[in-house]
Amino acid sequence: MTERWQNPGGWGARHIHGIAPFNLWDDLNRKYRLPTKEEYQWIDTKFEYRSITISGWYICIETNNPPNPVPLTIGCKPAIYIGINETFPEPLPKAPYSNPQIPDPCPHLHLRRMEFPTDADNIALLKALKPLANVRAVVYLPLWTVVELEYGDNRVYERISLPGTVASRTTMYHHAEAPFYSSMRNLTATLQLDLSGQEEPPRMLLQGKHIKSGSWTEVNGMGSGLVSLISYGKLFRKPTYGYPDIPFDR
């Protein structure tokens, strides 16, 4: 993998085909900066596109003619390619409960942008939310947090009735029978990976707590070919029904 990537262990990685002569990642401030006028001009000359969207953690290019070979990063920022007239919606929940004017129930904790929380951070956030909501799961994305609320428990939440900032992070809510990640399936490829046919055995296996936000991994299957995966979200989920109530710190 190292021959195809520079610094694949976090945000700011550069793909072998990402030949942009600039780096948009600001490691000191933990964020991507906007391209300069000259950098936009470089992108204009290298890509045939209808539109380009600059998000906080990716660049989305609308084109029917992506480069070949495809650069997975542009200026060390993850790049996504969609066809003309296709859409790439942000992973945002739809429940209208978030209210930024409600005080942060976890003001002592400051979750950093573009980083995954520790187990202790997640415990502190869950304890702070317990008096306010029945939480089923929490999804930590690069710039905001999605809190999944238990569905079918007869609990009713009014509009803008829950804090829009928790642990110094923008927080939104998902309230539906299906989990939040099910609503994001259109953000993923339809290709099914057959890991049993990998051309090479895995070189490294990491527990989830050791995987850093923005890190890249690769799977090389006999049928699918080389597939690159980026880790941009972390899910903490409540145990399945039937289990006894487990304290957050266990």
Image: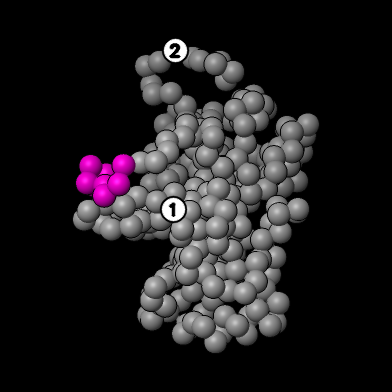
Q: What amino acid does circle 2 point to?
A: Pro
Label at residue 185: none
Task: Name which residue lies at 49% across and 82% down.
Answer: 47
Q: Say whether residue 57 is visible.
A: yes
Q: Amino acid at mark 1?
A: Met
Q: Residues within 10 Å of mark 2 (few under 14, many from 20)?
A: few
Q: Main secondary structure of the magenta part?
A: loop
Q: Position of residue 231 (x, y in %)?
A: 49, 48
The residues bearing labels 2 and 1 have C-alpha atoms spaced at a distance of 43 Å
On the picture, is 47 further left or further right than 116? left
> Which of the 4 image quarters holds residue 20?
bottom right
Q: Is residue 122 above or below residue 227?
A: above
N-terminal label among 2 and 1: 1
Give the magenta range. 192-201
- The local crowd at label 1, few if under 14, some if 14 to 19, many if 20 or more residues have their Cα within 10 Å, is few
The residue at which mark 2 appears reads as 244
Which element is circle 2 on?
Answer: loop
Horizontal arrangement in the rendering, residue 154 relative to residue 68 (left or right): right
In reply to whether residue 198 is colored magenta, the answer given is: yes
* Residue drawn at point x = 39 percent, y = 41 percent: 203
- The stretch drawn in magenta includes residue 24: no
Compare residues 152 and 169 and report the one nearer the observer. Answer: 169
- Give the numbered dot on residue 1: 1
At 54% from the left edge and 76% from the top edge, which residue is drawn?
52
